[in-house]
Image: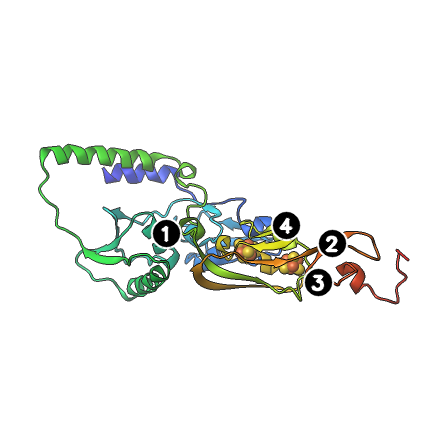
Amino acid sequence: MSILVNWLESLHKEMKVTAKCSRVRNKKSTCRYCMEKCKHNAIELNGELLIIDTKKCTLCGECMIACPSSAIEGVASNRNFEKGSLIFDKSYTPSLKELLIYKKRGMTSIQISDQALNQEWEKVLVDTNKRLKLLDESPITVTEKVRDEVLSRRAFFGSFQREGKQLAKRMAPVAWKMEQDDWKITKYFPNYQFYSVEINPYECTLCQTCFSLCGEVVFKLMDGKLLIKAEWCVNCTSCRDVCPEEAIKIQPEIKRKNEQYEFVHSKTCKDCGHTFYTFDKETEKCHMCKNRDPDWLSPYE
Ligand code: SF4
Ligand code: SF4
């Protein structure tokens, strides 16, 4: 059965960078998570965009798991599970984010058979369990593989049914298997934030460039406030890369989500007459007019 499954799988596998990639949306993006994760140097920059070299790509799926924006479609071909356990395989080391996501998908343990976990797996497991504690979740345990039992007639035919379903699932083209946002950590822990997002109101000019480039819609101007939904931030760094004032600070920090906002004021510029937003109640001129060289003749005077 497994030879047939592997053969069928080989017909459909490919990794694909989608339009959700921050480099597609933002020419100033410096995001390199996938490139840094790929051990085979299969991801290259073509101008600002990423391309996957299919000759070098081994379809390991590491890039797909690493992408904060869930912008790569494909399958992690060497991950194997059995009854809620991830089977230990020393040919790769799962990431912390990956284990957190598997935990929320129902994985409870890592299964070992004749070998103990290696140092890399041990480390990531300890780190993951520390984060799970902060997230009010039970830890992932290590279990030993139970030796195969002799199957009853009923269980034997039941196992055929299960295998059949798995086969049908594996035969589906890659794009069908990947649900949108499958590797986005925020989807699994909606009541927590993984990053703190701060905008410095003394530096920010409320130009709103970052608002439109954030694929997670973290920033929103509403009812006289700038709302910051830090619980949706995936640390794609797009906002930081684009901000001309270097006014944004993103840092890893797991905590319960809370309402975060800054008051903003809508004004009409004394010089140019355009409406603008500002954090400063007393300001009378928009950012452009305020910073115009005073020796230049104002087009509005
Ligand atoms: S707020 Fe977070 S998700 Fe949005 S652009 Fe910035 S780093 Fe990316
Ligand atoms: S890009 Fe920078 S200056 Fe413009 S709104 Fe965002 S934080 Fe403020």
The local secondary structure at tag 4 comes to loop
How much space separates mark 1 and mark 3, taking CA atoms?
A: 42 Å
Q: Could you say where residue 232 lies in the image, as x and y percent from the top left?
A: 50, 52
Disc 4 target residue: 223
Q: Residue at x 28, y 48 (%)?
A: 80
User: Mark 4 or mark 3, which is nearer the start of the sequence?
Assistant: 4
Q: Is mark 3 within 8 Å of ligand 2?
A: no
In this rendering, would 288 be left or right of 174?
Answer: right
Crowd tier of the residue under label 1, counting other residues whose Cα lies within 10 Å: few below 14, some 14–19, many 20 or above: many
Looking at numbered disc 2 in the image, what kind of residue is underneath it?
Answer: Phe
Crowd tier of the residue under label 4, counting other residues whose Cα lies within 10 Å: few below 14, some 14–19, many 20 or above: few
How much space separates mark 3 and mark 4, taking CA atoms?
A: 16 Å
**Quadrant of residue 134 within the rendered picture:** bottom left
Disc 2 target residue: 276
Crowd tier of the residue under label 2, counting other residues whose Cα lies within 10 Å: few below 14, some 14–19, many 20 or above: some
In this rendering, would 40 be left or right of 222?
Answer: left
Disc 1 target residue: 101
Please tell me the numbered disc located at residue 280. 3
**Quadrant of residue 97 within the rendered picture:** bottom left
Looking at numbered disc 3 in the image, what kind of residue is underneath it?
Answer: Asp
